[in-house]
Image: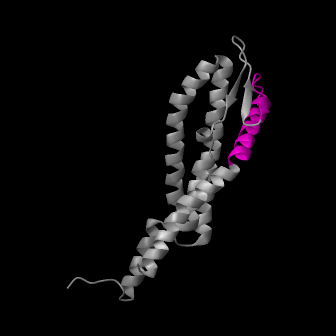
Amino acid sequence: MSRHVLGVVVRLLLTFAVPIVVFALLLDPWRETEASTISTILGNLGVTGASHAFGYQILVLPAASAPFLATISPSCSALAAILAFASISLFLVRGDVVRRFLAFLAAATIVVVCNMIRIGLSVYVGIKTDAGGLTVFHDWVGTGFGLLYVLGGFTVYLWVLLPSNRTLLSEYQRARANGGAGRAS
C-alpha cells in the first residue's frame, strides 16, 4: 500500500471514528444543554407549560391532559450533524483552514438553530395537545424539517467552502494568459 493510499485510509478512518468517540463523550451534556436552552427560550417567549428541564428532559404541562416529560433522544440532538461537519472539515476536506472553519461554523449554526426550532415546536405542540400530539408532530414534521436543515447546512457548507465561479474564471484566465492552460491543436 502506497503512502498516499495509506494517508487516505487514515483520514477516512479518522473522519468516522472521531465523531463516534466525541459523540459518546458529549452526548448527555449536549442534550442537557439543548433541553435547558429550549425550556429557557420557551419561558422567555411567554410559553407556559414547558419552562423546566430535568437533565435532557423537558417537563411539558398541557392544559387538557396529563403532564409528561419530553426526552431529547440521541437522534433528536444536533450533536451528530455538527460532529459530522467538524470531522469532514478536519480530516476529509483539504484547503484553507480558515475557509474550512467558516464553512463548518455556517453549517453548524444552521443545524443548531433549526434543531432548536424543531424541538421547540415539538414541545409547543405537546403543550397544546398531549404526548401523542408531540410524538406525531416530531415523527413527521420534525423528521422532514430535520432532513431539510441538514441538507441546507450542507449546501451552505459547500457554498462557503468552494471558490466562486468568478474566482475560478479569473484563475483560468490568468493560467491561460501565462500559457498554463491546455490549447487545442
For the stretch drawn in magenta, what is the main secondary structure? Answer: helix
Closer to the camera, 30 or 162? Answer: 30
Where does residue 105 sit, x and y in percent of width and height?
63, 57
Give me the residue at 64% from left, 17% from top.
130
Where does residue 50 sit, x and y in percent of width and height?
75, 26
- Residue 12 in the magenta stretch? The answer is no
Colour scheme of this structure image?
A: one colour
Where does residue 119 sit, x and y in percent of width and height?
64, 34
- Residue 126 placement: quadrant: top right
Closer to the camera, 129 or 44? Answer: 129
Q: From where the camera sits, is residue 177 visible?
A: yes
Q: Seen in the image, is 93 located left or right of residue 123?
A: left
Give me the residue at 62% from left, 41% from top.
74
- Residue 20 placement: quadrant: bottom right
Eyeballing the image, is 164 above or below 30? below
Give me the residue at 39% from left, 89% from top.
178
Q: Seen in the image, is 144 located left or right of residue 50?
A: left
Looking at the rendered image, the quarter that the N terminus falls into is bottom left
Q: Seen in the image, is 33 located left or right of residue 130?
A: right
Residues drawn in magenta: 27-54
Looking at the rendered image, the quarter that the C terminus falls into is bottom left
Q: From where the camera sits, is residue 93 visible?
A: no
Q: Most extreme residue toward the front, as rendered?
A: 1
Eyeballing the image, is 54 above or below 165? above
Eyeballing the image, is 145 above or below 49? below
Q: Most extreme residue toward the top, as rendered?
A: 64
- Residue 39 in the magenta stretch? The answer is yes
Give me the residue at 54% from left, 23% from top.
136
Eyeballing the image, is 140 above or below 8? above
